[in-house]
Image (spheres, rainbow, N blue to C red):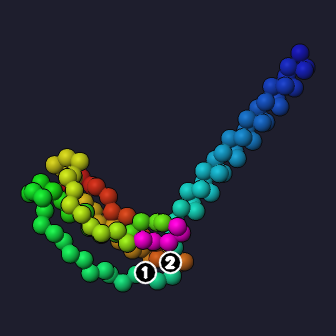
Amino acid sequence: MFFIVYLKTIFIKKYIAICGVTILTILVGCGSSRLVVKEKPADPVYYRPAPPNSSFIWVGPGYVKKAGKYEYRNGYWASPPNSRHRWIEGKWKQTRRGWVWVGGHWGTI
């Protein structure tokens, strides 16, 4: 009986340790996804072509993370997920460490 209780105790301690390491790994991974730059790039000059049809919405230009830096992405026309959605533009946000790009997203009206 003592041996079974001992095994259950070891199992519970290992389970707690594995859960703790997993949670810590997730939290550290989430924190490192922010890419900070010392200076935000100058606003690019871009050309907005005519929409394919009146139901399309302009998805403004922005930046994507690639190889440890921000890469500019041109804007484009897109069909919204449904008629109640609109595109919310991305923007640069200043932090204590520098500038971070906050990407655009679809939002409801």
Residue at coordinates 78% horizontally, 36% vertically from top-left? 14
Rounded to the nearest whole Å, what is the CA distance between mark 1 and mark 2? Answer: 7 Å
Residue at coordinates 89% horizontally, 15% vertically from top-left? 1
Q: Is residue 102 visible?
A: no
Taking the view exactly as shown, the residue that stands out farthest to the right is 2
Q: Is residue 46 left or right of residue 18?
A: left
Badge 2 element: loop
Residue 76 picture quarter:
bottom left
Taking the view exactly as shown, the residue that stands out farthest to the left is 54
Taking the view exactly as shown, the residue that stands out farthest to the top is 1
Residue at coordinates 37% horizontally, 64% vertically from top-left? 103
Magenta-drawn stretch contains 68: yes
Query: What residue is pinned by disc 1?
Result: 40
Q: Position of residue 41 (x, y in %)?
A: 40, 81
Badge 1 element: loop
Q: Amino acid at mark 2?
A: Val
Residue range of the region highlighted in magenta in the rendering: 67-71
Q: Is residue 22 left or right of residue 12?
A: left
Q: Position of residue 102 (x, y in %)?
A: 40, 66
Query: What residue is pinned by disc 2?
Result: 37
Quadrant position of the C terminus in the picture: bottom left
Q: Are marks 1 and 2 in contact (CB under 8 Å)?
A: yes
